Amino acid sequence: MEKFLHEEPVVPRTDEEKQAVINRLKRIEGQVRGIQRMVEEDRYCVDVLVQISAINAALKKVGSTITERHLKHCVSNAVQQGEGDEAIEELIAVMQHISK
Amino acid sequence: MEKFLHEEPVVPRTDEEKQAVINRLKRIEGQVRGIQRMVEEDRYCVDVLVQISAINAALKKVGSTITERHLKHCVSNAVQQGEGDEAIEELIAVMQHISK
Amino acid sequence: MEKFLHEEPVVPRTDEEKQAVINRLKRIEGQVRGIQRMVEEDRYCVDVLVQISAINAALKKVGSTITERHLKHCVSNAVQQGEGDEAIEELIAVMQHISK
Amino acid sequence: MEKFLHEEPVVPRTDEEKQAVINRLKRIEGQVRGIQRMVEEDRYCVDVLVQISAINAALKKVGSTITERHLKHCVSNAVQQGEGDEAIEELIAVMQHISK
């Protein structure tokens, strides 16, 4: 993705915001290690698949928190600067890439 | 998921099979840590979203490797034992749960 | 979805915009009828699955066109009115519902 | 998809099976026309997005019914003929294509 707008968010993330996202990512990291153990222990395939889908769901939640913040800060700011369409097209392009 | 069939795969995974899946999961674990750093460093939201979608894609690949193995061993074996329909219904139920 | 904002888009869709979306939906309608024929003719399951995924992809494209327009008009307008956060939260809620 | 296996299902679909799937597809066709009307009537974008996601969910259900039947007949039959792996690899390839 080329970043026509900013190298970082317009409004820097607060420490609380960062910590909340990082805590969720640490839980996800633990879930990924949990699956490694399941595979080592030769656990039933179907149980492994269920765990993988739990991680995908958790990642989607993180993605949607980040998208919401991006819309409320970066995109809203761009709209007020009259650069809204470019910011929106960039986000739509990423979301299409993601939903693929 | 109730496991009507087996507590573990009919044919235990070979060490090579396990190692291949575990290596991919270790890479995914590293990608999750990478996103934590991006958030700490206040990197641009859109770049974080792109990384999250890369992890989702990598997890899907792992899931499909595990599903393939499950079909080739657990389900095929159940089919030969005349228990195929139960094994297939269990897998379909998980895949619906996952695609939700 | 409760519509806290408007019963219709701030900026009405132009006839060109409407026609473009409707044409794509008509093609999708034809694809759905095509699958009905495939089932009637007892076509191979895997080919039917491929057609279903083609429709899902086409519907995603329509959804993303509508989302882009919603952001560029309804949401951008709300941002300028100082109602941006509500509009963004509504959209995020729908996108989470959709990606489920 | 190349069809290394059969031009049609091993066990032809019963009329009941066909009718059940076709009825669901007719409902989906009606939902697609409903969205065309919503766009013509300039209905609120978010409501259109919700309808699109309802169609995607309905199509997934049809796909999973067809996948289940494919596993219970075509794939199970191939397993009994000792051609299971090819049938499974074909299905996995389609599912990866679909989940993309």
Image (cartoon, coloured by chain):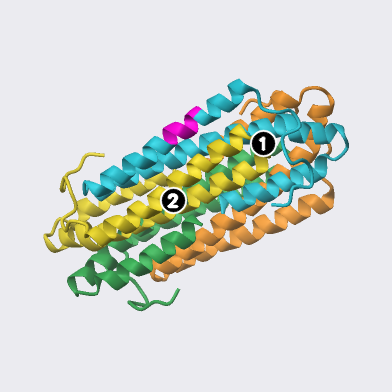
Chain colours: A yellow, B cyan, C green, D orange
Nearer to us of marks 2 and 1 is 2
Residue occupying the point 32% across, 63% down: C70
> Where A13 sits versus D9, above or below?
below
Q: Chain of mark 2?
A: A
Point out the stretch of residues depicted in magenta: B23-28
- Residue C90 placed where, x, y %? 37, 69
Which residue is located at x 40 percent, y 54 percent?
A24
**Mark 2: few, some, or many residues within 10 Å (few <14, many ≥20)?**
some
Q: Which mark is residue C27?
A: none
Residue D13 lies left or right of residue A50; in this view the side is right
Residues under labels 2 and 1: Cα distance? 38 Å
Letter of the chain that mark 1 sits on in the rendering: C
- Circle 2 is placed at which residue position? A27
Left or right: B2 as drawn, with respect to C54: right
Question: Amino acid type of disc 1?
Answer: Val
Classed neighbour count for the residue bearing mark 1: other residues with Cα under 10 Å, few (<14), some (14–19), many (≥20): many
Provide the secondary structure element on which disc 1 rests: helix
Of residue B20 and residue D47, the one placed in the foreground of this image is B20
Q: Quadrant of residue A62?
A: bottom left
Would you name the residue on which mark 1 appears?
C46
Of helix, strand and loop, which one carries label 2? helix
Give B34 or A96, whichever is nearer the viewer. B34
Picture coordinates of residue A22, whole percent (x, y): 33, 52
Question: Measured along the vertical axis of the image, is residue A17 above or below residue C42?
Answer: below
**How many numbered marks, from 0 up?**
2
